[in-house]
Amino acid sequence: MKDDNDRLLEGTLPQDPFADAEPLNPDTPEATTDENPAWPDPLPIGPVANVPAFPVDTLPPWLRNWVTALATALQCPVDLPAMLGLAVLALCGAKRYQVHVAQGWDEPLNLYVAVALKPGESKSPAFAAAIRPVSRFVAEERKRTDPEIRAAMARADVAAKRTDHLKTRAAKASAPEEYAKSLALVEEAVLEQGAIEVPVPLRLVLDDVTAESLEAVLRQQGGRIALMSDSGAPTLR
């Protein structure tokens, strides 16, 4: 059998390298030469199923009215405001309610929500409308607790300076009686300083956080926090 090198030397190598090509599968139909060939429908990736409509009627009237009104105003599927509303309610109920499954088996109200929509489906406006009451509540609480936090910070600062001052006096004491008395005052000041609790500003929603930072925020906020974003950004890094 001659190969292309032999044909090249003989001058019989065809101009079209695929002129004498044969299909691997004889049953394969010949390629069409039309300018606009008909392509078969692409095969779906993964299982295809008809998603049922969101059961809006199962929601309480006040939430159902909000969901339908927002979906109508934004011209978006009711699924979007409904899922966002449930996520906000889960945040509000966190650390307040639990699901009692059985004797000795209680579960917290943790809810994982993901809504996938195409661009221009009003995800950002719907998210802003759902999170607005939470943002307003946080702002009001921070305004209410700000004086208390500032006062506690001032007490902690004064206590720290007093402790440092007493430490200096104790270190300079020469007589044993004076040293013992100064040391007792230092210990008392340290206990008083440690007893001062400085509240942290309220924080309920995060949009991007590391696992280490999330642990710290959870401790500060009493174990209640929500990771929410209109772009799907919340991930633990």
Image: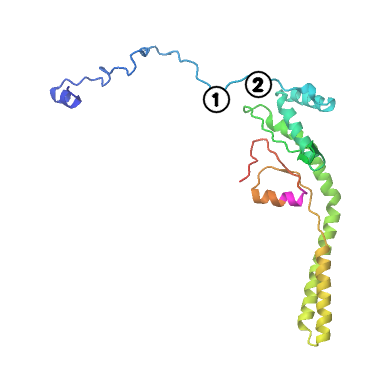
* Residue corresponding to mark 1: 46
Q: Are marks 1 and 2 in contact (CB under 8 Å)?
A: no
Type of amino acid at the residue the image marks with label 1: Gly
Residue 100: which quarter of the image?
top right
Residue 85: which quarter of the image?
top right
Tell me, for residue 51, which label it has, or none: 2
Seen from this angle, which residue lies furthest front?
103
Question: What residue appears at the point 15 percent right and 22 percent down from the top-left corner?
Answer: 11
Q: In this view, does 97 lie above or below 56?
A: below
Type of amino acid at the residue the image marks with label 2: Val
Q: Where is residue 92 in the image (x, y as percent from the top left)?
A: 80, 39
Seen from this angle, which residue lies furthest left?
10
- Helix, strand or loop at label 2? It is loop
- Between the C-alphas of marks 1 and 2, the distance is 14 Å
Q: In this view, does 199 lie above or below 131?
A: below
* 104 vs 80, nearest the viewer: 104
Tell me, for residue 29, which label it has, or none: none
Q: In this view, does 12 lie above or below 95?
A: above
Q: Position of residue 47 (x, y in %)?
A: 57, 23
* 95 vs 151, nearest the viewer: 95
Q: How crowded is mark 2: few (under 14 residues within 10 Å), some or many (20 or more)?
A: few
Q: Where is residue 69 in the image (x, y as percent from the top left)?
A: 79, 24
Q: Say if the magenta span includes residue 58.
A: no
- Helix, strand or loop at label 1? It is loop
- Magenta range is 217-222
* 42 vs 68, nearest the viewer: 42
Q: In which quarter of the image is the N terminus?
A: top left
Question: What residue appears at the point 77 percent right and 73 percent down from the top-left corner?
Answer: 164
